[in-house]
Image: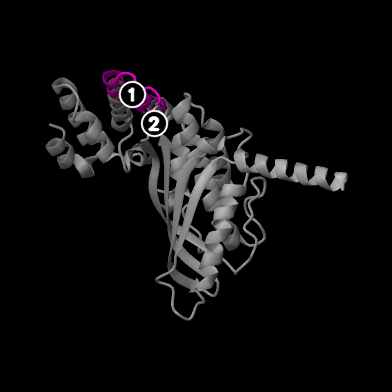
Amino acid sequence: MIKYSLLLLIAVFDLHFVTIAQELQSKVTVIASRVPSTVDKKIFTTLQTQLTNFINNRKWTSDVFQPQERIECSFLLNIESVVETNVYKASITIQAARPVYNSSYSTALINFQDADVTFRYVEYQPIEFNENRVQGSDALASNLTAVFAYYVNIILGLDYDSFSAKGGDGYFQKAQNIVNNAPENRNISGWKAFDGLRNRYWLAENLLNNRFNLVHDVIYGYYRAGLDKMYENEAEGRTGMLNALVQLQGINQENPNSMVVQFFMLGKSQELIRVFKKAAPPDKARAVETLQKLDIANSAKYQQEIK
């Protein structure tokens, strides 16, 4: 009886450790409204549960995260069509946020849609990933977990970068490893340079290319030297954010139309407007000028709302 109680205590301790050790608090949603009624939609509920467990229960780093430190993120997998039996074409929207120091506010780390996800899924098939063998025996089945693992590492890299300069390099390297060893099939795209200008290949390439080294200083400056300073000294925090944006515009000028610059700006327009509406007139003017060059789609909004 004593032995049984001891084993139970150890099991509870181990379970508690697993609970506090994981890095991500993710919500996965699978939408299959475009899938023909001939397909049993229950399999997508099963897939949603399996993907949620895959992300939240896997240990992605060697660090220990307390429950309140877990990175909040979401993945929306939208099934667009059925390619063949058990093979689906989908898009995936990835969002992740980071808390701002001494506030209840969370700021976006990533807000991106990837339109090139084709995969095979049979209900209850194992959702597994081996970073040493990215492509398993079934390329289309492996592609699903490769895509999710890739974006998990991008999220981790961005989060670590935001707390220490170039702190995310190891996770960007892991994402690059997935790109280099990605599953190959005639229906799979998004992993190669020739698949487009805005894909998984180019994001990882930009994040690791020495030409874009200053991007990591921008990430650190925007979050740690910018937003995190707002509580203690609002003007200093705003200056940190503006300096980071000016630095990003320098990168943009030298490397026009690069993916990483546009990727960084996605989902930040309202945050930037709220921050710089309260700036001193010279900083407002400098912010508007910089933002209009960095985020052309929202150019008029910046001009109108940062007054």
Q: Position of residue 41 (x, y in %)?
A: 49, 73
Q: Position of residue 25 (x, y in %)?
A: 51, 45
Q: Is residue 223 magenta?
A: yes
Circles 1 and 2: CB distance less than 8 Å?
Answer: yes
Q: Report the magenta stretch's main SS.
A: helix
Of 21 and 50, the residue lying toward us? 21
At label 1, counting other C-alpha atoms closer than 10 Å, the crowd grade (few under 14, some 14-19, many 20 or more) is: some
Of 29 and 1, the residue lying toward us? 1
Mark 1 and mark 2: span between their CA atoms? 9 Å
Q: Is residue 272 magenta?
A: no
**Residue segment shown in magenta:** 220-238
Judge left or right: residue 183 versus residue 227: right
Secondary structure under the numbered disc 1 in the rendered image: loop
Residue at left offset 34%, top offset 36%: 261
Secondary structure under the numbered disc 2 in the rendered image: loop
- Residue 104 quadrant: top left
Judge left or right: residue 191 versus residue 133: left
Question: What's the amino acid at mark 2?
Answer: Val
Q: Above or below — where is 295 with respect to 213?
A: below
Q: Earlier along the polypeptide chain: callout 1 or callout 2?
A: 2
- Residue 274 quadrant: top left
Quarter of the image with the C terminus is top left
Q: Position of residue 244 (x, y in %)?
A: 33, 25
Residue to which mark 2 is pinned: 100
Q: Give the residue furthest to the front.
A: 1
